[in-house]
Amino acid sequence: MPLWPVYTGTNEPHDGITKLPPPPPWRAFDGGPVLDAPDAAADASAVSPDRMHRAETYQATQQTVQLVNAALYLRRPLLVTGPPGTGKSSLVYAVARELRLGPVLRWNITSRSTLHDGLYQYDPLSRLYAARQAAARQDHAAGTAAGTWAEGTRAEGTRGTADGSGIEHHLRLGPLGTALLPYARPRALLVDEIDKSDLDLPNDLLNVLEEGQYEIPELVRASRPGADDIAEVMTDGTGERAPVARGRVRCRAFPFVVLTSNGEREFPPAFLRRCVTLHLRQPDDRHLAEIVRAHLGEPDAYAQTLIDRFLSRAGVGDLATDQLLNAIYLARSADLDAESLDRLAEQLMPYLGRTAQPDVF
Ligand SMILES: Nc1ncnc2c1ncn2[C@@H]1O[C@H](COP(=O)(O)OP(=O)(O)OP(=O)(O)O)[C@@H](O)[C@H]1O
Ligand SMILES: [Mg+2]
């Protein structure tokens, strides 16, 4: 029986992802050979305490739960927009933990990021160096000066496993390239701050996500016609190796992809049409109290005062949830009198951008 919602927002890990119904026919992918999800036991070591904490404490609203499930069902990326500190980057960690999707693959976008960076990196210089060393070792062993590095490299094609000069030893998949491997269970991918990218990246990215596949030309060129050339390439994050046949990668279970944006850019309609869009708002008082409870335990009277102040200030200008968390944490752990606490809390919650009215703290 199909399950709705698969992601519940309760932060209790489960295997509901196996009950996801088949994709719509226009989003079905058949890559292979199918790879197991990364070892759940390896997760803990691959996840930093900060990311683990974000995952365990995330408080999802009903709207968030519904749209995460829509993206999972439709096999579409989720574009998450909203003001600073509203939990855009944290959401994917909570979903990956609850649905046991393995360590989150993370791609932080800057103005210099290109699609290629997200797919894979190839280092021809280190390959050249390895090939030269291998040739020198061979010459030494044979006691002759015969053979050149170039001959050795050409003969090896993509492989060269024995001496480390094959392409696969010098090629590493990026976060996007890894997410599109044919895993049996969707991988979770965070493409953080896509609005910081140069103009072409959103469309380039959406094209690859639309196709669910890409090529690695260096491996395609090196593969022999008719041969089942399989390169064992390094993946992002855990550094495990995965087989890539004839330089082509096609996904099986479409990854759970979260693209975040602070709204610094308007995206073209063609981009928006291919995403499920979730706009996060500043949390209301009930939601804020839940967030504080999840991070720091039951709010005491002073924490409640800070929540109220935060809310009245948030109506005036941009504030981030973690500013409030910092203020409550300090109020609990620092031994300060009420007046000093008030002053410090005020300094910890300055407006981040636009203010509609003068400061009324
Ligand atoms: N719904 C939430 N539940 C629990 N914690 C939250 C929630 N929203 C925000 N936080 C906390 O607030 C902090 C900021 O969250 P996060 O970094 O995900 O926000 P963001 O929207 O990505 O911010 P930015 O726009 O600055 O990148 C984190 O410590 C996170 O744990
Ligand atoms: Mg963020």
Image (cartoon, rainbow, N blue to C red):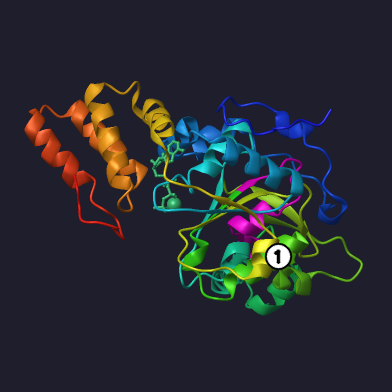
From this view, report whether residue 354 is shown above or below residue 102.
Answer: below
- Residue 131, picture quadrant: bottom right
Image quarter hosting the N terminus: top right
Ligand 1 quadrant assignment = top left
Direction from residue 354 to residue 175 in the image, left or right:
right
**On the picture, is 298 further left or further right than 270?**
left
In this rendering, position of residue 291 left or right of residue 31 = left
Q: Residue at x 26, y 28 (%)?
A: 303
Identify the residue position indicated by label 1 in the image.
208
Q: Residue at x 25, y 32 (%)?
A: 328
Query: Given the current orientation, which residue lies at the most extreme front position?
Result: 357
From this viewpoint, is residue 276 visible?
A: yes
**In the rendered structure, which segment of residues is drawn in magenta?**
164-188
Whether residue 167 is visible to the viewer of this picture, yes or no, is no
What residue appears at the point 82 percent right and 62 percent down from the top-left corner?
229
Q: Residue 287 or 131: which is nearer the viewer? A: 287
